[in-house]
C-alpha cells in the first residue's frame, strides 16, 4: 500500500486511494484473486511493482491490462521499471495474450518517454469513463 500511495501522490491524486489494505490483499491473494503482480526487491525491500489483470476486448480478445507500474522515487533511473515491463511482456507472451494495454497521464513526460522506447501506441480520442462506489449506490 505504501507504493500505491506513493504513486497516487506522484499522480497528484492522493485522495483517490480509497481501497483498504484488507481489500487490496483480498483482491490479490483471497479466494478469487483479480490481480497479479511482479515486484522489484533490493536488499529485502520492495522498491517497485507492476500490477496487472486480464482484460477482455470484444475486438482483440484477452489482453493484459497494466493497472500500475511504480518504482520508488529513490530507486528510479536504475532500469528497474524496464525490468518490470520486460517481465510483463514475457508473461503476456507466455499466457497467449493478444496484447498489453495501460494508461498514462498526458502530463507524465518521463513515463511517456519511457513507453516510447517500447514503441507503444498512444491512442488519441478516448476518454476515461467511470462510476464511483457512491454513484453506483444511487441506482
Image (cartoon, grey):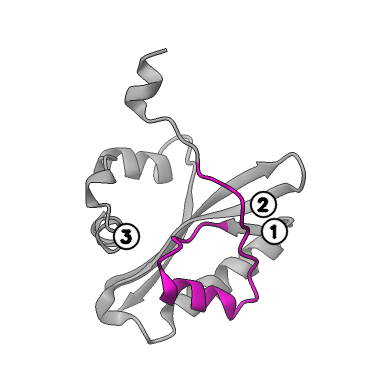
Q: Quadrant of residue 22?
A: top left
Residue positioned most to the top? 139
**Foreground residue, 92 or 106?**
106
Question: Does residue 43 show up?
Answer: no
7 horizontally vs 56: left or right: left
Disc on the earlier residue, 1 or 2? 2
* Magenta span contains residue 108: yes
- Give x and y (percent) for residue 98: 74, 56
**What residue did someone put label 3 on?**
11
Residue span colored magenta: 102-128
- Residue 33 pos. (x, y %): 47, 41
The residue where tag 2 is placed is 63
Mark 3 vs mark 1, CA separation in Å: 25 Å
Q: Residues within 10 Å of mark 1 (few under 14, many from 20)?
A: some
Extreme residue toward the bottom, this view: 78
Q: Is residue 69 above or below residue 30?
A: below
Q: Quadrant of residue 102?
A: bottom right
- Disc on res. 2: none
Q: Dot 1: what SS?
A: loop
Task: Write down the residue under mark 1.
Answer: 99
Q: CA distance from mark 3 to mark 2?
A: 25 Å
Q: Tell me the quadrant of the picture where the C terminus can be found.
A: top left
Residue 56, image x, y percentages: 67, 42
Disc with the residue nearer the chain's start (3 vs 1): 3
**x, y percent for residue 136:** 40, 21
Foreground label between 3 and 1: 3
Describe the element under mark 3 as helix, strand or loop: loop
Q: Are dots 1 and 2 in contact, CB under 8 Å? A: yes
Magenta span contains residue 125:
yes
> What residue appears at the point 53 percent right and 71 percent down from the top-left corner?
85
Other residues around mark 3 within 10 Å, as few (<14) / some (14–19) / many (≥20): few
Amino acid at each position: 500500500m505504501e507504493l500505491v500511495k506513493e504513486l497516487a501522490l506522484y499522480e497528484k491524486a492522493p485522495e483517490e486511494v480509497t481501497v483498504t489494505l484488507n481489500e487490496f490483499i483480498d483482491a490479490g491473494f483471497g479466494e478469487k484473486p483479480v490481480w497479479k503482480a511482479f515486484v522489484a526487491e533490493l536488499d529485502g525491500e520492495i522498491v517497485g511493482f507492476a500490477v496487472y489483470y486480464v482484460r477482455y476486448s470484444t475486438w482483440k480478445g484477452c489482453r493484459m491490462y497494466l493497472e500500475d507500474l511504480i518504482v520508488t522515487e529513490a530507486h528510479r533511473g536504475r532500469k528497474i521499471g524496464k525490468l518490470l515491463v520486460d517481465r510483463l511482456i514475457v508473461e503476456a507472451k507466455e499466457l497467449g495474450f493478444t496484447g498489453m494495454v495501460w494508461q498514462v497521464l498526458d502530463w507524465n513526460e518521463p513515463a511517456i518517454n519511457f513507453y516510447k522506447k517500447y514503441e507503444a501506441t498512444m491512442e488519441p480520442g478516448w476518454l476515461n469513463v467511470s462510476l464511483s462506489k457512491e454513484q453506483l449506490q444511487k441506482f
